[in-house]
């Protein structure tokens, strides 16, 4: 499937970065949806801003590095890095303007909902001004560190993502020379400052409080002007692993560089004094195209804090707690006995993540458990998984943990966990040279009457009990002998001892998984050519691997019906005659972040179902350790198909990729409203209620086929 393939032309592919921006526009469109409650719209607006920050720190930074290095190779869409950067700049400027237009439209709804935002400190009443000034003296002033710049004091380090107030000042002795000064808005204080109000809630932002009182920071100066600004720096770590004597120390060194990496984006208050702007721009070496004048408060991620305000429940959608039980595990406290009885498939967050934690905790305490082996990519700040592994080591178990130190933006957190685990007596592996270990697998080795038995957990998401309440993921608990043997082989490979010649059930990247996917897609193509049943349904976070897309084009051209459920990046194009006419792509953007990876192949009526930790991206298939595992039990396959069917029916949160390479929601005229995430919440809640009433009935996903008709009345 080389470059000469008829499906390899660059015009058949979308640039990865531009496709990501389309995803952030889909998130922003949720903030623009007038059918959603006000606070839900604020939440999506905040998420779109947070997403864009990370996009700049990683993807835009990478493009700038390539341009600076003179990298001329074109991407799959035929664009050089310089062309990509120009296109991205144009799109991001337009996106930011759209974000702030949305912000102001939402702000206009605040007064009628009992909220008052004081946009500028000059708008304070006399009483409010007195309160704000007292708040500054008591809470803010002691924390601030004003920084002046002159011949003896160089331009200070402006840290990545921090909000700052830049000022031009002049000495009171009458000298005309202007001097630059800056003060960082402290992140240790709440950015939202509430002001006593007899009606509703009133608040002002912290930077406005500081700006109002900035004269108190420079007593011997006149303030000529003062404006907030914020910079984004290159946060992509460059780690020379082959030459690093100690990977942990090397990553710690690189983390410090994030604060003074190349400045790649400058946000300034619209109307900033041109003299002040030029000083900041020159000192940070920022080009005009990387300056973003903002008509509103900088960094609107603070809106997420507003989402949780008490007393405004009517401005949020109903809160589904996402903590419903797993029926197969609710009757017997012995989780190993439950797994011996049957394989257990969990769908988070509609089913609680607690059994995964219980699996590790019980293994830590069980005297018959000999060893626990686990991979950790991202964990929560106060992880019960880490605590259980520590206890296991203290109880004399053999505990081996691969902690991926290169998990982006979790490096520092993972270093802390790795050292804690080592201190507790665990054997810690710091990832593999040149590869990220992104697989999610736990192996528990237990001594039983009939000999050694291996219990395995495999998942599509991280061992993070916090994000498990927000991300949709699947997890499988099994004591299958074949999978147990494979799990042992995985950990032997990760620790560097052996590489098996063959596998029973698992498929691993970077050595075999991509070829396995290409084989499965190619097999569907052959079935279609022979007039046999052929269909592919694939759900993932991103699709940008060229070989995979070519294979999908070939399968589509052969007549295979292909449904792709892709939350984020999709470099494939739909509706191309003779190429992708049989491919449909949808992206679901809802209250939960769609994170599960599911792959279904019709296979001439002998259906195959798989889950994986990997997306169809080069980084997942070529540069990471990933695991795909089959779902083989018919009752579990039914659960998987029900998930896919629900998502393919979604007409509320699904955005459809169009032949013009844009996304749009479905025209609802004459069509049924169906929100797949809400439907799962309703079903999980109803089934939990029934389970309480009749503990011996198992009613979650297996009963969906029977309950969907009656449940639909409650879904909308």
Image: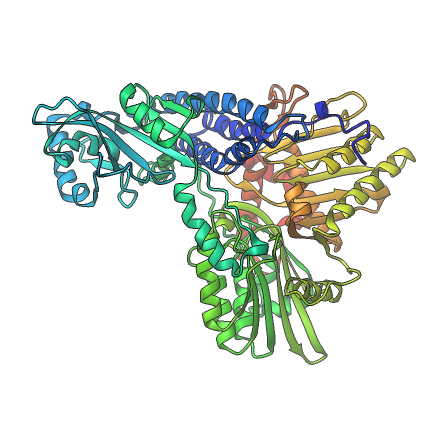
Q: Residue at x 36, y 34 (%)?
A: 303
Residue 91, horizontal then vertical, whole percent: 51, 22
Q: How many marks?
A: 0
**For the N terminus, which image quadrant?**
top right
Residue 93: x and y in percent read 46, 22
Q: Is residue 28 above or below residue 160?
A: above
The residue shown at (52%, 30%) is: 24
Q: Is residue 312 above or below residue 393?
A: above
**Residue 615, image x and y in percent?**
65, 43
- Percent across and percent down for residue 54 are 47, 38
Q: Which is more toward the observer, 536 or 434?
A: 434
Give the colour scheme shown. rainbow
Q: Nearer the viewer, residue 643 or 374?
A: 374
> Is residue 201 visible in this depiction of the protein?
no
Q: Residue at x 55, y 60 (%)?
A: 430
| Residue 650 picture quarter | top right
Kindly give the residue lying farthest to the front in the view shown: 151
> Residue 313 lies in what quarter of the image?
top left
On screen, residue 88 versus residue 633, left or right, reads left
**Residue at image point 65% right, 46% down:** 620
Q: Nearer the viewer, residue 244 or 469?
A: 244
């Amino acid at each position: 499937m080389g470059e000469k393939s008829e499906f390899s032309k660059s015009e058949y592919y979308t640039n990865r970065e531009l496709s990501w921006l389309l995803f952030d526009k889909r998130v922003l469109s949720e903030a623009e949806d007038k059918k959603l409650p006000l606070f839900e719209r604020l939440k999506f607006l905040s998420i779109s801003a947070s997403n864009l920050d990370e996009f700049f720190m990683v993807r835009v930074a990478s493009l700038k590095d390539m341009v600076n290095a003179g990298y001329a190779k074109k991407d799959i869409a035929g664009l050089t890095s310089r062309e990509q950067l120009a296109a991205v700049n144009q799109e991001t400027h337009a996106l930011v303007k759209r974000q702030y237009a949305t912000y102001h439209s939402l702000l206009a709804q605040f007064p009628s909902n009992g909220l008052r935002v004081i946009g500028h400190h000059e708008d304070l009443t006399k009483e409010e001004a007195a309160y704000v000034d007292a708040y500054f003296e008591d809470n803010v002033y002691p924390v601030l560190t004003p920084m002046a710049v002159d011949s003896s004091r160089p331009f200070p380090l402006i840290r990545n993502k921090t909000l700052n107030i830049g000022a031009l000042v002049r000495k009171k002795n009458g000298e005309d020379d202007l001097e630059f000064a800056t003060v960082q808005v402290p992140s240790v204080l709440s950015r939202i400052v509430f002001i006593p109000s007899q009606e509703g809630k009133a608040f002002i932002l912290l930077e406005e409080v500081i700006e109002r009182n900035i004269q108190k920071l420079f007593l011997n100066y006149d303030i000529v002007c003062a404006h907030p600004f914020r910079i984004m720096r290159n946060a992509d770590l460059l780690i020379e692993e082959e030459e690093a004597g100690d990977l942990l120390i090397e990553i710690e060194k690189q983390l410090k560089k994030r604060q003074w990496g190349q400045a790649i984006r400058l946000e300034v208050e619209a109307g900033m004094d041109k003299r002040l702007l030029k000083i900041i721009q020159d000192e940070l070496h920022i080009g005009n195209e990387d300056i973003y004048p903002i008509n509103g408060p900088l960094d609107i991620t603070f809106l997420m804090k507003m989402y949780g305000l008490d007393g405004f429940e009517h401005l949020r959608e109903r809160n589904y707690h996402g903590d419903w039980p797993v029926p197969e595990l609710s009757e017997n406290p012995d989780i190993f006995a439950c797994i011996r009885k049957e394989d257990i498939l969990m769908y988070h967050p509609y089913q609680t993540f607690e059994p995964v934690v219980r699996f590790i905790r019980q293994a830590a305490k069980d005297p018959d458990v000999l060893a626990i082996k686990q991979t950790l990519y991202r964990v929560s700040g106060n992880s019960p998984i880490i605590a259980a592994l520590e206890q296991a080591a203290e109880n004399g178990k053999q505990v081996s943990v691969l902690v991926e130190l290169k998990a982006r933006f979790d490096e520092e957190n993972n270093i802390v966990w790795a050292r804690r685990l080592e201190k507790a007596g665990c054997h810690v592996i710091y990832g593999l040279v040149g590869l990220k270990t992104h697989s999610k697998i736990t192996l528990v080795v237990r001594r039983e009457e009939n000999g050694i038995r291996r219990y395995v957990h495999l998942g599509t998401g991280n061992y993070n009990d916090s994000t498990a309440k927000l991300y949709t993921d699947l997890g499988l608990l099994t004591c299958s002998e074949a999978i147990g043997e494979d799990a042992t082989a995985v950990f032997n490979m990760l620790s560097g001892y052996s590489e098996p010649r063959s596998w029973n059930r698992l498929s691993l990247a970077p050595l075999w998984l991509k070829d396995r996917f290409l084989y499965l897609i190619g097999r569907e193509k052959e079935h279609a050519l022979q007039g046999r049943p052929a269909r592919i349904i694939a759900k993932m976070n991103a699709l940008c691997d060229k070989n995979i897309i070519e294979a999908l084009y070939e399968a589509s051209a052969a007549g295979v019906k292909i449904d792709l459920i892709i939350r984020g990046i999709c470099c494939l194009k739909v509706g191309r005659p003779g190429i992708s006419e049989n491919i449909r792509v949808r992206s679901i953007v809802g209250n939960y972040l769609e994170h599960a990876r599911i792959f279904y192949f019709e296979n001439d009526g002998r259906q195959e179902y798989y889950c994986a930790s990997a997306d169809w991206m080069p980084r997942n298939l070529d540069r990471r350790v990933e695991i795909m595992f089959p779902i083989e039990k018919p009752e579990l396959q039914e659960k998987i198909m029900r998930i896919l069917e629900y998502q393919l029916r979604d007409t509320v949160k699904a955005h459809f990729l169009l032949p013009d390479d844009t996304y749009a929601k479905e025209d609802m005229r004459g069509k049924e409203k169906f929100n797949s995430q809400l439907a799962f919440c309703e079903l999980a809640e109803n089934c939990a209620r029934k389970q309480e009433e009749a503990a011996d009935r198992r009613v979650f996903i297996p009963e969906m086929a029977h309950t969907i008709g009656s449940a639909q009345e409650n879904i909308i």
